[in-house]
Amino acid sequence: MKKVMIMGVGAQGSTIAKRLQEEPKIREIICADYDPRAAQDLEKSLSKAKAVQVDARKVADVVKAAKGAELIVNGLPPDFNMSVMDAALEVNACYQDLASGPLGDGNFVGAVRKQLDRDQQFKDAGLAALTNTGSAPGVANIVTREACDKFDSVDAITIYVYDGIWSKRFIPFWWSPDTAFGDMAAEPVIYENGAFKTVPPFSDPEWVDFRGIGKRRVYDHEHEEPVTMGLLADRYLKGVRNVRFRYGGPACELARDFYRMGLLSWRAVEVDGVEIVPMRLISKLTPPAPKYREEIQQVLDEGMELEEGAFLVRVDGVKDGGALRVDSYVNAPDLTESFRKAGITHESYYTGQSAFLFTKMFVNGKIDLTGVFPPEAFEAGARRYYLEEAAKLDITVDEVVQRRLY
C-alpha cells in the first residue's frame, strides 16, 4: 500500500499521519481537512504528507482528493461516514473509521445498521471497510472477541472504563467538553436479553472493584460496543445476550450532577428575563482540554494530584458445563507517560495510537476480510498481530480467568 488519505486531521487523524510517516511501504499521506491550517501543519512537518482542503459533505470533493489512494481513514464525526464510504467505493479504496454513531437523529442502532448494510457493496468491490477503530471502540472489540473464543456460550459482556485524572488546574475533560457533555446527556443503548433498549443517562450505578485502584462507581454510557456486538452476537460472540458499556470518573460525576440539576438540557430557561440554553452555558464555561504541546506541558509543570484509570472487559458465560468469567485489563500509558513518549495527552495517545495500528494492518496486508465489519470480526491471527504491535507501544492486556467447577 503506497498511498493513504486521512480525512480529518485533528487529534487522532494527525497521530495516524505521524505514525504512517514511519511506515516504509507508504509513499504519500494525503492529509485532508476542511481547516487548511490543520492539514498544512502536517505537510510542513512530514515529508510524505500532502495537504488538501476538502468539504466532506461533498462526495465529489472527497473523490477528487482521494484519487489513487488505496485506503481512506475517516477521522471525522460519524455524520460523515456514509459520504466518505461512498467516496471510498468510487475510488476503489478500502475504508476505516473511528466511530459509527450516534448520528444527528439520535438513532444509534440505525447508524450502525446503515454501515453494515453496505457490506455486499464492499464485498462486490473486493474492498474492506473496517469501522470503530480506536481504543473503545477498537481495542475493546479485539479483546472482547479474544475472550469470547474461550467460551462455549457467552451470557454477558460488560466494558468498564474509569478515567480519574486530577490536575491542579481545573480540567474536567481531556477531550472536547461539547462532545463530552453531549455523550453524558444521551440515553445509552444497551443490549439486554437479546434486544436493544435505551436507558436513562447515569442509570443503574455500579461499584466495581478494579484491580489496583479499588472500588469505583460507573454508569451506563452511550457507546458503539453494545450496538455492534448485539447485531453480530451470533456471528462472532458466541450468542451473547447482554452487552453494556459503563463509564466512570470525576468528569462523569460532575456531568451527573449537572444533569440532575437540568444543566445538560437544550431547552431554554428564563433567568431574569433572559432566555438561556443550559447546555450552551455549561459548554461555554467549561475550560477546554489542553491541545497543544506547550499547553499540556504547562499543566504538567503546575502539577498533577492523581492519575488513575482502569479499562476492563468482563465476559461471563459457560465452558464445558461450568461457569466461566474472563476479565481482561487493558493497560496504557497515563497522561504524564503519554506526554513523555509522544507529546500528547493520554486520550490522544490511547485512541490515536490504537487507531493507527488498525491502519498499519491495512498497510502491511494483515486484513484478509472484505465487506463492512468492526474489529470483533477479526480471527485469531489478525488479533494476535494487532496485540503484538500494541504491546510495542506499551498497550498491553492482562487476563484473569475465573472458573467454577460443577
Image: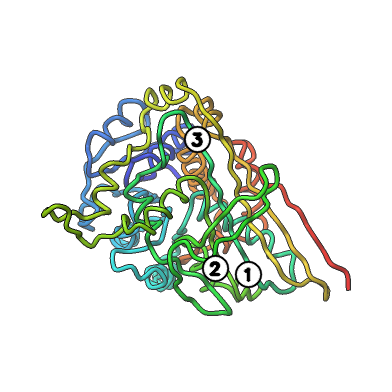
Q: Are marks 2 and 1 in contact (CB under 8 Å)?
A: yes
Could you tell me residue 335's position as x and y percent? 52, 33
Q: Quadrant of residue 205?
A: bottom right
Please count the marks in the image.
3
User: Between tags 2 and 3, which lies in front?
Assistant: 3
Instruction: Name the residue nearer the viewer: 96 or 324.
Output: 324
Residue at image mark 3: 166
Does residue 9 appear anywhere in the picture? yes
Mark 2 or mark 1: name the one nearer the start of the chain: 2
By what rule are the colours in the image chosen?
rainbow
Residue at image mark 2: 229
Q: Secondary structure at mark 2?
A: helix
Q: Secondary structure at mark 3?
A: strand
Q: At x 40% / y 34%, what residue is drawn?
A: 170
When the figure is inspected, residue 393 is found, relative to residue 66, above or below; the finding is above
Could you tell me residue 289's position as x and y percent? 37, 37
Instruction: Name the residue nearer the viewer: 59 or 398.
Output: 398
Q: At x 21% / y 50%, what residue is drawn?
A: 55
Q: At x 58% / y 35%, what residue is drawn?
A: 333
Amino acid residing under circle 3? Trp
Between the C-alphas of marks 2 and 1, the distance is 7 Å
Mark 2 or mark 3: name the one nearer the start of the chain: 3
Instruction: Name the residue nearer the viewer: 382 or 395.
Output: 395
Between the C-alphas of marks 2 and 3, the distance is 33 Å
Residue at image mark 1: 237
- Residue closest to the far front: 272
Q: Residues within 10 Å of mark 2 (few under 14, many from 20)?
A: many
Instruction: Name the residue nearer the viewer: 270 or 351.
Output: 270
- Compared across the picture, whether 294 is left or right of 246 comes to left
When the figure is inspected, residue 366 is found, relative to residue 111, above or below; the finding is above
Does residue 363 appear anywhere in the picture? no
